[in-house]
Structures are given as structure tokens and as C-alpha cells.
Amino acid sequence: MRPVALTVFGGLLWLTGTASAWAGAPAPPPQAWIRATTADVIVVGKVTTIEDRKVRAERFLGDSGEYTVAVVKVEEALLGAKDLTHVKVGSLPPVPGRGRFFPSARLLKGQEVLLFLTPHAREPFLVPLDAFGVIDKRTPTFAGDLDSVRRAARALRHPVAALKAKDAGDRLLAASVLVFHYRRPRPGPQKLELVPAEESKLILTVLAEADWNPRAGIHPQYAFDQLGVTDRDGWAPPGDYRQVAATAKKWLRDHAETFRVKRVVAVKKDK
């Protein structure tokens, strides 16, 4: 598996309430919409075949493992799988001795799943982002997870339309998804690029208009903290934490026209 998947997941631990993981407890999965921001391919499907032959391939640089390859019939392509009827997914057994912390994302024949995938670095199959790259249809929260992932994938495909949605919750989800997607680390050398001006303005406007005291759901500060604003951008954190929301909302309103969201992109190596 690409090391970036682990890096990104590690960077999102604070969003999932997983502080207890460092004390020895297994980490719960990140919210489904967050998983969507790091995937190259998202599909809903059913496992039709488990191939007999194992494939020894690179897990990450300097290490390899035996992948079990499953054939998944695509029932709904949410992202990056347009016109595909089937995808091949390679998965690994749990890391020996550490399965409690790094459980397996292996698939079983007949299993119906929501998958968050990325291409394997060298082999012609996809791999789950991490141990939480598979959501089984029998999971009690599956319907809600699928709904949020559908909306997240829609935002990634059509960002401006999603940021202009009628529902405030949909707009906030879109802004959060886009910020997390744009700001996540990429493998290898990276650089920053400006997001289109209209889209950037809409992201800041949505965050400024959102409820910063929600009783449940997504908090706008998650996305604001990922923007990477500093004193050079006119941002001065208040001394009183109770004033953070009001100060951030004012900064967003004042800078919606001038600040540009930046996205992290991988630098392509010359052949």
C-alpha cells in the first residue's frame, strides 16, 4: 500500500476522537466522508470472485506482502470508476502481532461493500486506503455512511455546484470535503497550486456562514484549521478560545475575495 495512505490517515486521527488509540485502545474508523477525501476510486459493489493465486507485491517502499485479489462487481461508481463494471482489489492479512491496531481489510466472496481505493504502486489492481477502506453493507451505519459519501463524491466531481447547494449542511459538507481533499499530502515531491478563484471564494463564504456551534455533525473549524492561514494572511488567533469562532468567521468574510485556497499536488518526475 502506498505510504501516503497511512500518512493521511494519521493526520486525521484528531478528527475521529482517537486519542485513546495512543493509550493502547484500537482506533475507531474515521468518518465516511473523511475517507472519501483521500480515495482515488470509490465504488459500491459485491465480491463475485476470490482469485486462488496470491500476488507478492510491494506494500510500501522496502517491504512486500502477499495480496489476496478479489473481483468486485461495481453496482455504483461514485468516484474514479466511470464505465467500469468490475474492479480487482488486493488486500493483505493483518500485520503479525499488531492486528489489534492494524486490522485487515480483506474481502469475502458474496460480501457487499462500499470501497475506498487507490491504485497499487506497481500491480494492476486497486487496494483499500487502509484497514478502514471497506465498509460492509451489514454495518448498522451503512445507509448514513453511503449517503454522506455520495454527497462527498458529488462535491469532488462538481465542486462549484455542491458549494451552491440549497441545503446549508450540504454546502458545509462540500466545503469540508474539498478543503481536506486539496490539503492532504501527496506521495513524493509536492507543490502548492491555487484553487480557481470562484471556488475558493465559495469555500470561504460557506465556512463563514456555517454554524460554528453545532450540536452534532461537521464543525467548520475542521476545515478552517486545514487552510493553513497565518499572520501573513491577516490571521491573528484570539487569546480567548471562546472568541475563535467569531474571529474566524470575520476573517473568512473579510478575506473571501482576496485569499486563495491552495491545493497540494504531486510533482511529476521527468522521464
Image (cartoon, helix red, strand yellow):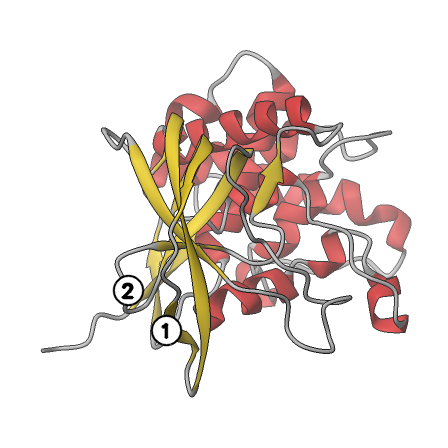
Check the picture and name the quadrant holding the C terminus: bottom left
Residue at 32% in and 58% down? 193
Residue 10 picture location, percent across and down: 64, 66
- Residue topped by disc 1: 57
Query: Can residue 216 be seen in the rendering of this structure?
Result: yes
Earlier sequence position, callout 1 versus callout 2: 1
Residue 136 picture location, percent across and down: 62, 36
Residue at 55% in and 34% down? 111
Q: Which residue lies furthest to the top in this view?
A: 166
Could you say which quadrant of the image residue 6 lies in?
A: bottom right
Residue 238 picture location, percent across and down: 81, 57
Residue 59 picture location, percent across and down: 45, 73
Going by the image, does 25 lie left or right of 81? right
Q: Residue furthest bottom?
A: 62
Hey, what amino acid is under mark 1?
Ala
Q: Is mark 1 on a helix, strand or loop?
A: strand
Do the CB atoms of the residues marked 1 and 2 lie less than 8 Å apart? yes
Going by the image, does 150 lie left or right of 104? left
Check the picture and name the quadrant holding the N terminus: bottom left
Q: Nearer the viewer, residue 245 or 71?
A: 71
Q: How crowded is mark 2: few (under 14 residues within 10 Å), some or many (20 or more)?
A: few
Which of the labelled discs sits on residue 129, or is there none? none
Q: What element carries label 2?
A: loop
- Residue topped by disc 2: 123
Could you say which quadrant of the image residue 95 lies in?
A: bottom right
Query: Can residue 259 be seen in the rendering of this structure?
Result: no
